Image (tube, helix red, strand yellow):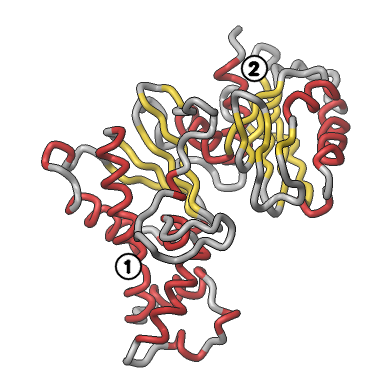
Amino acid sequence: MGNVRKAFGVDIGGTNVVIGLVTENGDVSDVKKFQTKDFNEYRKLIDALSVYIKSFKDECIEGIGIGAPNGNFYKGTIEYPANLPWKGITPFAAELTEKCGSKVFLTNDANAAAIGEMSFGAAKGKKDFIMITLGTGVGSGIVINGNLVLGSNGMAGELGHTCIIPYGRKHPGTGLRGSLESYCSANGIVETAKEFIAKFQSHSPLKFFEEKDITAKLIYEHALKGDALSLQIFEYTGELLGKAFANFVMFSAPSLIVLFGGLSKAGGLILNPAKKYMEENLLEVFKNTCSIQLSGLPEDDAAILGAASLVFQNVKN
């Protein structure tokens, strides 16, 4: 076991910060969770992480990988995150390195998930694929020729904020209109439900809920029971997702799109229409060249596996 490479994986999310020890074989241990709201300043989180990391002084750790919203790999910074307690640009990697003395690699959380998927999940052995996270928002990581696409400023791959409906819904966090995230995230599907309920003429149990009580999970549960309105909501969401996927496929020609996150648990309810409308909107040369699969990573460990993979990928033996 002494020869197995080890790294810390850190997932910084809007609700929780999770850290765990990960081996190059994908084994995860010593997981600790913090509540993000407890850290109104980023340096307080750095202090908490460094105390935990230093408690493993007898372990041979190769580095620390971090996945964070708006993480910039080139600079090691978190830049203007919409859902974290601190704002602006924070030099997170540099300051954690200074505290711990370990190499720190930081990137966008969806990019970290893509690297994890390539190392341990459904994209293992794939050199051209796109990772899409369908959660509160829509994140993405693009891999071309085995390399993560970072772009000139380290922030490439924001497919969730591309426009799918011109002059469509206004995104509350960005102010942009018609973005994929506005329609195909967990929040987006709830907004679709509210719009569809107002127009739906037939009976549906969703009509008896107050707007504040409508969730993506509720819509999913009623769709499973055959509620026509709930099924219509998923069909519409899958249609928009599929049309967006067609654009993405014609952009980078991936062999695989991997879906991860809460909304992907709807399985065929969202996968089937997404695949159908993707194929309908592709040029002939791209048809039937890209499959859509659910993530192969264990949900509880996926984010820290991806973050730790940053270390294994960038630190050579």
Instruction: Write the residue at 47% across / 42% down.
Output: 158
Whether label 2 touches label 1, CB < 8 Å: no
Q: Residues within 10 Å of mark 2 (few under 14, many from 20)?
A: some
SS at mark 2 in the image: loop
Q: Residue at x 44, y 70 (%)?
A: 220
Label 1, residues with CA under 10 Å away: few <14, some 14-19, many ≥20: some
Name the disc covering residue 59, or none.
none
Task: Check the picture and name the quadrant holding the N terminus.
Answer: top right
Residue projecting furthest to the top: 317
Nearer-the-camera pick, 116 or 42: 42
Q: Residue furthest left?
A: 284
Judging depth in this view, the residue of 28 and 305 nearest the camera is: 305
- Three-letter amino acid code of the residue under disc 2: Arg
| Of the image marks 2 and 1, the number of the one nearer the N terminus | 2
- Looking at the image, is 301 positioned above or below residue 214? above
> In the rendered image, which residue does mark 1 sit on?
236
Location of mark 2 (residue): 5
The residue drawn where x is 54% and y is 44% is 298
On screen, residue 135 versus residue 3, left or right, reads left
Find residue 252 and report its horizontal and vertical position in percent. Answer: 31, 33
For the residue marked with disc 1, what is the amino acid?
Tyr
Residue 270 position (above or below residue 101): below
